[in-house]
Image (cartoon, rainbow, N blue to C red):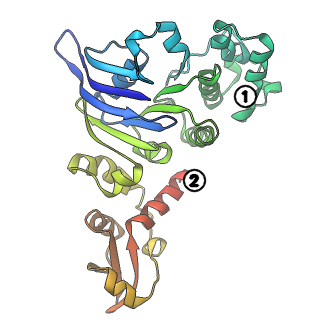
Amino acid sequence: MIKFENVSKRYSDGTIAVDSLDFEIRQGEFFVLIGPSGCGKTTTLKMINRLIALSDGTISINGKKISEYDIHELRWNIGYVLQQIALFPHMTIGENIAIVPEMKKWRREKIQKRIYELLDMVGLDHEIYANRKPIELSGGQQQRVGVVRALAADPEIILMDEPFSALDPISRVKLQDDLLDLKKNLKKTTVFVTHDIQEALKLADRICIMNEGKIVQIGTPDELVTDPVNDFVKEFVGGKYGKRTNDIKLEDLLHTANVAEIGEESSVIVPSSTPVQEILEILYEHEQLAIEENGNLIGYIDRRSVMQYVSAKLQKGV
Protein backbone atom coordinates (compact mmCIF):
# COMPACT_ATOMS: atom_id res chain seq x y z
CA MET A 1 0.00 0.00 0.00
CA ILE A 2 2.48 2.68 1.24
CA LYS A 3 6.06 1.59 0.73
CA PHE A 4 9.23 3.33 1.94
CA GLU A 5 12.45 2.28 0.22
CA ASN A 6 15.73 3.67 1.58
CA VAL A 7 14.02 6.98 2.41
CA SER A 8 16.10 9.75 4.00
CA LYS A 9 15.60 13.42 4.75
CA ARG A 10 18.59 15.73 5.16
CA TYR A 11 18.44 19.48 5.72
CA SER A 12 20.89 22.07 4.43
CA ASP A 13 22.52 22.46 7.85
CA GLY A 14 23.47 18.77 7.76
CA THR A 15 20.72 17.56 10.09
CA ILE A 16 19.52 14.07 9.18
CA ALA A 17 15.87 13.96 10.22
CA VAL A 18 15.12 10.56 8.71
CA ASP A 19 17.76 7.97 7.88
CA SER A 20 17.30 5.12 5.38
CA LEU A 21 13.76 3.98 6.19
CA ASP A 22 12.54 0.70 4.71
CA PHE A 23 9.06 -0.49 5.63
CA GLU A 24 5.58 -1.01 4.22
CA ILE A 25 2.17 -0.01 5.56
CA ARG A 26 -0.54 -2.49 4.60
CA GLN A 27 -3.92 -1.80 3.06
CA GLY A 28 -6.47 -0.95 5.77
CA GLU A 29 -3.86 -0.97 8.54
CA PHE A 30 -3.77 1.42 11.49
CA PHE A 31 -0.03 2.14 11.66
CA VAL A 32 1.40 4.24 14.49
CA LEU A 33 4.71 6.14 14.38
CA ILE A 34 6.09 6.87 17.83
CA GLY A 35 9.34 7.83 19.48
CA PRO A 36 11.06 10.61 21.45
CA SER A 37 10.79 14.24 20.35
CA GLY A 38 12.93 14.86 17.28
CA CYS A 39 13.05 11.20 16.26
CA GLY A 40 11.67 11.89 12.75
CA LYS A 41 8.13 10.57 13.10
CA THR A 42 6.32 13.72 11.91
CA THR A 43 8.82 14.21 9.08
CA THR A 44 8.12 10.62 8.00
CA LEU A 45 4.37 11.29 8.03
CA LYS A 46 4.64 14.55 6.07
CA MET A 47 6.76 12.99 3.35
CA ILE A 48 3.83 10.72 2.43
CA ASN A 49 1.72 13.61 1.12
CA ARG A 50 4.76 15.62 -0.04
CA LEU A 51 4.46 18.34 2.58
CA ILE A 52 8.15 17.59 3.12
CA ALA A 53 10.32 16.54 0.18
CA LEU A 54 12.45 13.45 0.69
CA SER A 55 16.20 13.66 0.00
CA ASP A 56 16.85 10.06 -1.01
CA GLY A 57 14.89 6.91 -1.74
CA THR A 58 11.31 6.46 -2.87
CA ILE A 59 7.85 6.38 -1.35
CA SER A 60 5.17 4.66 -3.39
CA ILE A 61 1.43 4.27 -2.96
CA ASN A 62 -0.17 1.26 -4.63
CA GLY A 63 3.03 0.71 -6.58
CA LYS A 64 3.25 4.25 -7.97
CA LYS A 65 5.90 6.70 -6.74
CA ILE A 66 4.40 9.72 -4.99
CA SER A 67 6.58 11.95 -7.22
CA GLU A 68 4.62 10.63 -10.21
CA TYR A 69 1.23 11.73 -8.84
CA ASP A 70 -0.23 15.12 -9.60
CA ILE A 71 0.09 16.92 -6.27
CA HIS A 72 -3.64 17.71 -6.11
CA GLU A 73 -4.58 14.14 -7.02
CA LEU A 74 -2.23 12.85 -4.32
CA ARG A 75 -3.53 15.11 -1.55
CA TRP A 76 -7.19 14.74 -2.44
CA ASN A 77 -6.81 11.02 -1.86
CA ILE A 78 -5.11 11.54 1.53
CA GLY A 79 -7.06 12.91 4.50
CA TYR A 80 -4.96 14.93 6.94
CA VAL A 81 -5.70 15.64 10.62
CA LEU A 82 -3.48 18.00 12.62
CA GLN A 83 -3.01 18.71 16.30
CA GLN A 84 -4.00 22.30 15.50
CA ILE A 85 -7.56 21.69 14.38
CA ALA A 86 -7.48 24.52 11.79
CA LEU A 87 -11.19 24.78 11.06
CA PHE A 88 -12.09 27.90 9.10
CA PRO A 89 -13.77 30.12 11.71
CA HIS A 90 -15.97 32.05 9.28
CA MET A 91 -17.46 28.85 7.84
CA THR A 92 -20.11 26.61 9.36
CA ILE A 93 -19.18 23.07 10.40
CA GLY A 94 -20.94 21.73 7.31
CA GLU A 95 -19.02 24.11 5.05
CA ASN A 96 -15.73 23.08 6.67
CA ILE A 97 -16.46 19.41 6.00
CA ALA A 98 -17.53 20.12 2.41
CA ILE A 99 -14.26 21.75 1.27
CA VAL A 100 -12.57 18.81 -0.48
CA PRO A 101 -15.77 17.25 -1.88
CA GLU A 102 -16.55 20.64 -3.44
CA MET A 103 -13.04 20.84 -4.92
CA LYS A 104 -13.65 17.39 -6.39
CA LYS A 105 -16.93 18.73 -7.83
CA TRP A 106 -19.26 16.36 -6.02
CA ARG A 107 -22.98 16.98 -6.47
CA ARG A 108 -24.52 19.19 -3.78
CA GLU A 109 -26.94 16.47 -2.66
CA LYS A 110 -24.09 13.99 -2.28
CA ILE A 111 -22.05 16.47 -0.24
CA GLN A 112 -24.98 17.23 2.05
CA LYS A 113 -25.64 13.54 2.64
CA ARG A 114 -21.94 12.97 3.42
CA ILE A 115 -21.84 15.86 5.92
CA TYR A 116 -24.84 14.53 7.82
CA GLU A 117 -23.57 10.95 7.74
CA LEU A 118 -20.14 11.84 9.11
CA LEU A 119 -21.38 14.15 11.86
CA ASP A 120 -23.83 11.52 13.08
CA MET A 121 -21.08 8.89 12.93
CA VAL A 122 -19.04 10.74 15.59
CA GLY A 123 -21.99 11.61 17.80
CA LEU A 124 -22.60 15.16 16.58
CA ASP A 125 -26.26 15.43 15.59
CA HIS A 126 -26.19 17.03 12.13
CA GLU A 127 -29.42 18.93 12.80
CA ILE A 128 -27.69 20.67 15.71
CA TYR A 129 -24.10 21.02 14.55
CA ALA A 130 -24.01 21.31 10.75
CA ASN A 131 -24.87 25.03 10.79
CA ARG A 132 -22.87 26.02 13.86
CA LYS A 133 -19.55 27.87 13.69
CA PRO A 134 -16.38 26.33 15.14
CA ILE A 135 -16.31 28.79 18.05
CA GLU A 136 -19.58 27.30 19.29
CA LEU A 137 -17.98 23.85 19.76
CA SER A 138 -15.72 22.51 22.50
CA GLY A 139 -12.15 21.49 21.71
CA GLY A 140 -13.10 17.81 21.57
CA GLN A 141 -16.05 18.52 19.29
CA GLN A 142 -13.87 20.61 16.98
CA GLN A 143 -11.35 17.80 16.75
CA ARG A 144 -14.14 15.37 15.85
CA VAL A 145 -15.01 17.71 13.01
CA GLY A 146 -11.33 17.77 12.02
CA VAL A 147 -11.37 13.97 11.80
CA VAL A 148 -14.55 13.74 9.74
CA ARG A 149 -13.41 16.58 7.47
CA ALA A 150 -10.40 14.41 6.61
CA LEU A 151 -12.82 11.58 5.78
CA ALA A 152 -15.25 13.72 3.80
CA ALA A 153 -14.11 12.87 0.27
CA ASP A 154 -13.67 9.20 1.18
CA PRO A 155 -9.85 9.17 0.81
CA GLU A 156 -7.93 5.94 0.67
CA ILE A 157 -5.37 7.09 3.26
CA ILE A 158 -5.65 9.13 6.49
CA LEU A 159 -2.64 10.87 8.04
CA MET A 160 -2.99 11.98 11.66
CA ASP A 161 -0.29 14.09 13.31
CA GLU A 162 -0.72 13.98 17.12
CA PRO A 163 -4.40 14.89 16.68
CA PHE A 164 -5.44 14.46 20.32
CA SER A 165 -2.40 15.70 22.22
CA ALA A 166 -3.85 19.15 22.97
CA LEU A 167 -7.11 17.80 24.39
CA ASP A 168 -8.04 17.25 28.02
CA PRO A 169 -7.88 13.60 29.18
CA ILE A 170 -11.63 12.95 29.03
CA SER A 171 -11.98 14.37 25.51
CA ARG A 172 -8.89 12.46 24.45
CA VAL A 173 -10.25 9.11 25.61
CA LYS A 174 -13.60 9.81 23.90
CA LEU A 175 -11.86 10.68 20.62
CA GLN A 176 -9.73 7.53 20.84
CA ASP A 177 -12.89 5.47 21.29
CA ASP A 178 -14.50 7.25 18.32
CA LEU A 179 -11.42 6.45 16.27
CA LEU A 180 -11.58 2.78 17.25
CA ASP A 181 -15.18 2.69 16.02
CA LEU A 182 -14.23 4.43 12.76
CA LYS A 183 -11.32 2.03 12.35
CA LYS A 184 -13.68 -0.95 12.59
CA ASN A 185 -16.34 0.51 10.32
CA LEU A 186 -14.28 2.24 7.63
CA LYS A 187 -11.05 0.22 7.46
CA LYS A 188 -9.03 3.14 6.11
CA THR A 189 -5.25 2.91 5.82
CA THR A 190 -4.23 5.23 8.66
CA VAL A 191 -0.80 6.57 9.63
CA PHE A 192 -0.94 8.06 13.12
CA VAL A 193 1.82 9.98 14.90
CA THR A 194 1.78 10.15 18.69
CA HIS A 195 4.18 10.56 21.59
CA ASP A 196 1.88 8.59 23.92
CA ILE A 197 2.63 4.86 24.13
CA GLN A 198 -0.70 4.18 25.87
CA GLU A 199 -2.52 5.74 22.92
CA ALA A 200 -0.40 3.69 20.49
CA LEU A 201 -1.08 0.42 22.32
CA LYS A 202 -4.79 1.17 22.35
CA LEU A 203 -5.20 2.10 18.68
CA ALA A 204 -2.53 0.43 16.58
CA ASP A 205 -2.50 -2.68 14.45
CA ARG A 206 1.28 -2.19 14.28
CA ILE A 207 3.61 0.31 15.92
CA CYS A 208 6.87 1.68 14.50
CA ILE A 209 9.23 2.92 17.21
CA MET A 210 11.77 5.45 15.93
CA ASN A 211 14.87 7.02 17.46
CA GLU A 212 17.32 9.48 15.92
CA GLY A 213 15.71 9.18 12.50
CA LYS A 214 15.87 5.40 12.34
CA ILE A 215 13.46 2.54 12.89
CA VAL A 216 14.23 0.63 16.07
CA GLN A 217 11.38 -1.90 15.94
CA ILE A 218 8.09 -2.49 14.13
CA GLY A 219 5.56 -4.86 15.60
CA THR A 220 2.09 -5.37 17.01
CA PRO A 221 1.39 -3.96 20.48
CA ASP A 222 1.71 -7.49 21.87
CA GLU A 223 5.08 -8.04 20.17
CA LEU A 224 6.54 -4.76 21.41
CA VAL A 225 5.43 -5.31 25.00
CA THR A 226 6.42 -8.95 25.24
CA ASP A 227 9.42 -9.11 22.89
CA PRO A 228 11.30 -5.77 22.75
CA VAL A 229 14.41 -5.98 20.53
CA ASN A 230 16.62 -3.96 22.87
CA ASP A 231 16.72 -1.92 26.07
CA PHE A 232 15.55 1.24 24.30
CA VAL A 233 12.28 -0.40 23.24
CA LYS A 234 11.95 -2.16 26.57
CA GLU A 235 12.23 1.15 28.41
CA PHE A 236 10.13 3.13 25.93
CA VAL A 237 7.29 0.62 25.87
CA GLY A 238 7.88 -1.39 29.01
CA GLY A 239 8.68 1.48 31.35
CA LYS A 240 5.62 3.48 30.41
CA TYR A 241 3.52 0.36 30.09
CA GLY A 242 4.62 -0.57 33.59
CA LYS A 243 3.27 2.71 34.94
CA ARG A 244 -0.18 1.52 33.93
CA THR A 245 0.23 -1.50 36.17
CA ASN A 246 0.94 0.19 39.48
CA ASP A 247 -2.57 -0.56 40.67
CA ILE A 248 -2.70 -4.15 39.38
CA LYS A 249 -2.96 -6.86 41.98
CA LEU A 250 -1.64 -10.38 41.61
CA GLU A 251 -5.16 -11.84 41.63
CA ASP A 252 -6.04 -9.65 38.62
CA LEU A 253 -3.64 -11.69 36.49
CA LEU A 254 -3.60 -15.10 38.18
CA HIS A 255 -4.96 -18.15 36.41
CA THR A 256 -5.88 -20.95 38.79
CA ALA A 257 -5.27 -24.22 37.01
CA ASN A 258 -4.47 -27.83 37.73
CA VAL A 259 -1.39 -27.75 39.96
CA ALA A 260 0.22 -30.71 38.22
CA GLU A 261 -0.11 -29.00 34.84
CA ILE A 262 1.42 -25.82 36.20
CA GLY A 263 4.41 -27.73 37.49
CA GLU A 264 5.00 -29.38 34.14
CA GLU A 265 4.61 -26.24 32.03
CA SER A 266 6.48 -23.68 34.10
CA SER A 267 10.19 -23.81 34.77
CA VAL A 268 10.09 -20.48 36.64
CA ILE A 269 8.35 -20.35 40.01
CA VAL A 270 7.97 -17.11 41.95
CA PRO A 271 6.42 -16.52 45.37
CA SER A 272 3.07 -14.78 45.60
CA SER A 273 4.73 -12.02 47.64
CA THR A 274 6.72 -10.89 44.56
CA PRO A 275 5.73 -7.33 43.52
CA VAL A 276 3.75 -7.18 40.30
CA GLN A 277 6.40 -4.94 38.72
CA GLU A 278 9.03 -7.64 39.28
CA ILE A 279 6.71 -10.29 37.84
CA LEU A 280 6.28 -8.18 34.70
CA GLU A 281 10.05 -7.83 34.39
CA ILE A 282 10.46 -11.60 34.61
CA LEU A 283 7.78 -12.05 31.93
CA TYR A 284 10.05 -10.22 29.48
CA GLU A 285 12.27 -13.30 29.63
CA HIS A 286 9.73 -16.08 30.19
CA GLU A 287 6.38 -16.85 28.60
CA GLN A 288 4.78 -18.14 31.79
CA LEU A 289 5.43 -18.04 35.53
CA ALA A 290 4.09 -20.35 38.21
CA ILE A 291 3.07 -18.69 41.48
CA GLU A 292 3.60 -20.40 44.81
CA GLU A 293 2.31 -19.60 48.27
CA ASN A 294 3.51 -21.33 51.43
CA GLY A 295 5.25 -23.95 49.30
CA ASN A 296 2.16 -24.73 47.19
CA LEU A 297 1.56 -23.80 43.55
CA ILE A 298 -1.59 -21.69 43.39
CA GLY A 299 -1.73 -20.71 39.71
CA TYR A 300 0.18 -19.10 36.87
CA ILE A 301 0.60 -15.81 35.04
CA ASP A 302 1.50 -15.56 31.37
CA ARG A 303 2.22 -12.78 28.91
CA ARG A 304 -1.13 -13.15 27.18
CA SER A 305 -3.07 -12.65 30.40
CA VAL A 306 -1.10 -9.49 31.16
CA MET A 307 -1.69 -8.09 27.65
CA GLN A 308 -5.41 -8.86 27.79
CA TYR A 309 -5.76 -7.23 31.19
CA VAL A 310 -3.85 -4.06 30.32
CA SER A 311 -5.59 -3.82 26.95
CA ALA A 312 -8.95 -3.91 28.75
CA LYS A 313 -7.78 -1.10 31.06
CA LEU A 314 -6.66 0.95 28.06
CA GLN A 315 -10.00 0.41 26.32
CA LYS A 316 -11.73 1.80 29.40
CA GLY A 317 -9.29 4.69 29.60
CA VAL A 318 -8.31 3.93 33.16
Does 255 sit left or right of 152 as displayed? Answer: left
Residue 131 visible to the viewer: no
Query: Which mark is on residue 250?
Result: none
Does 157 sit left or right of 111 as displayed? Answer: left
Query: Which mark is on residue 316?
Result: 2
Relative to 96, does residue 234 appear above or below in the rendering?
A: below
> How far apart are the alpha carbons under marks 2 and 1?
24 Å
Query: Which mark is on residue 119?
Result: 1
Q: Nearer the viewer, residue 58 or 232?
A: 58
Amino acid residing under circle 2: Lys
Q: Answer few, some or many: residues within 10 Å of disc 2's Cα (few below 14, many 20 plus, some between 14 and 19).
A: few
Q: Which image quadrant for residue 214?
A: top left
Q: Nearer the viewer, residue 293 or 23?
A: 23
Instruction: Kindly identify the residue that appears in the image at 45 percent across and 71 percent down.
Output: 253
Residue 227 visible to the viewer: yes
Q: Which image quadrant for residue 142?
A: top right
x and y, in percent, of residue 32 in the image = 42, 37
Sequence-wise, the earlier of marks 2 and 1 is 1
Quarter of the figure with the N terminus = top left
Q: How many marks?
A: 2
Instruction: Kindly identify the residue that appears in the image at 36 percent across and 69 percent down.
Output: 276
x and y, in percent, of residue 112 in the image = 78, 18
Amino acid residing under circle 1: Leu
